[in-house]
């Protein structure tokens, strides 16, 4: 657990030696962590940052797994609907196209951006950032892409789309025969991999490695 810094000593400390809690804004001296240790705010208990091992290698594996899952998650059938002798396969992409063709073009654009375009852009940004650290090239571009990624985080809403799919299934199950498709398994896997990636890809270590403060921060 980090210790709050004496306010009279803060002016004498460089900014790199200070950290502020994101929850209660307590300013404190940045603790030096060993592998797998975590720093918590002494006032509110919020986790400030953690030092995880093999961050780049583990994150790269998860990013590549997410990219492999992206296409089947969006273009394979999530569910098959059987009604009055007719069957239809519903995918994420067909949902976007259906909204567009029925005149709800604004909604279609929002769904496309939040469920397909932005999640893919986030993964590509993460991949480029990790490769810049791994290969030790273009770290200035990596900093820019990591900033872009953080601005995009709140716009990738796979979990919201997934909840919408669950609600639709509950409402349709009494009206027609439903069968789950392989796309749903890929979509859930993609969502879980991205959540895991958020945990593994420690922001503090990534920022430190990109800025050159600690070239071994992600080891």
Image: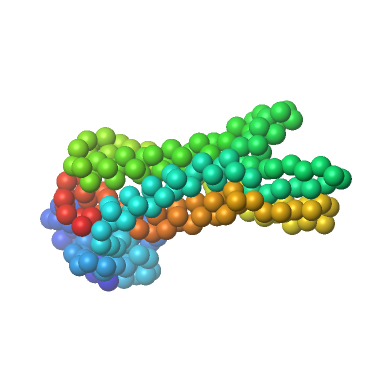
Question: In this figure, which colouring scheme has been used for the structure?
Answer: rainbow
- The residue sitting at 16% across, 50% down in the picture is 215
In the image, is residue 4 above or below residue 16? below
Indicate whether 191 appears above or below 35. above
In the foreground, 205 or 127: 127
Q: Is the N terminus in the top left, top right, bottom left or bottom right quadrant? A: bottom left
Expressed as whole percent of the image width and height from the top left, the position of residue 189 reads 51, 55
Q: Nearer the viewer, residue 154 or 94?
A: 94
Indicate the quadrant where residue 36 lies.
bottom left
Give the farthest residue toward the front.
85
- In the picture, which quadrant includes the C terminus? bottom left
Place of residue 50 in the rendered image (x, y in percent of width and height, measured from the top left): 29, 63
In depth, the one of 20 and 53 nearer the eye is 53
Question: Would you identify the image quadrant in which residue 218 lies?
Answer: bottom left
Residue 81 image point, x, y percent? 75, 47
Instruction: From the viewer's perspective, tell me whether residue 157 is left or right of residue 151.
Output: right
Q: Is residue 101 left or right of residue 50?
A: right
Q: Nearer the viewer, residue 114 or 25?
A: 114
- The residue located at (27%, 39%) in the rendering is 142
Instruction: Using residue 111 as the reference point, say whether residue 150 is left or right of it.
Output: left
Regarding residue 174, the answer to whether it shows in the image is yes
Residue at 30%, 36% (x, y): give it.
144
Residue 111, can we see it?
A: no
Q: How many marks?
A: 0
Instruction: Find residue 73 and report its horizontal and vertical position in percent.
Output: 55, 46
Measuring 23% from the left and 46% from the top, which residue is drawn there?
Answer: 134
Name the image quarter holding residue 132. top left
Extreme-right residue of the structure: 84
Figure check: 39 above or below 132: below
């Amino acid at each position: 657990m980090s210790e709050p810094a004496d306010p009279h000593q803060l002016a004498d400390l460089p900014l790199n030696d200070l950290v502020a809690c994101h929850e209660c804004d307590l300013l404190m001296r940045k603790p030096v962590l060993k592998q797998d240790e975590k720093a918590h705010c002494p006032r509110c208990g919020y986790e400030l940052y953690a030092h995880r091992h093999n961050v780049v290698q583990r994150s790269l594996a998860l990013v590549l797994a997410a990219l492999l899952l992206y296409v089947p998650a969006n273009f394979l059938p999530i569910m098959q609907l059987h009604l009055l002798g007719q069957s239809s396969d519903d995918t994420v992409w067909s949902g976007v196209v259906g909204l567009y063709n029925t005149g709800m073009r604004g909604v279609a654009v929002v769904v496309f951006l939040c469920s397909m375009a932005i999640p893919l852009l986030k993964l590509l940004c993460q991949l480029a950032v990790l490769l810049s650290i791994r290969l030790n090239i273009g770290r200035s571009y990596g900093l820019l892409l990591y900033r872009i990624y953080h601005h995009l985080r709140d716009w990738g809403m796979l979990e919201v789309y997934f909840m919408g799919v669950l609600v639709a299934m509950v409402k349709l199950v009494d009206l027609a025969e439903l069968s789950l498709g392989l796309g749903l398994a890929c979509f859930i896997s993609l969502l879980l991999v991205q959540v895991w990636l958020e945990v593994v890809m420690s922001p503090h270590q990534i920022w430190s490695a990109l800025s050159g403060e600690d070239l071994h921060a992600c080891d």
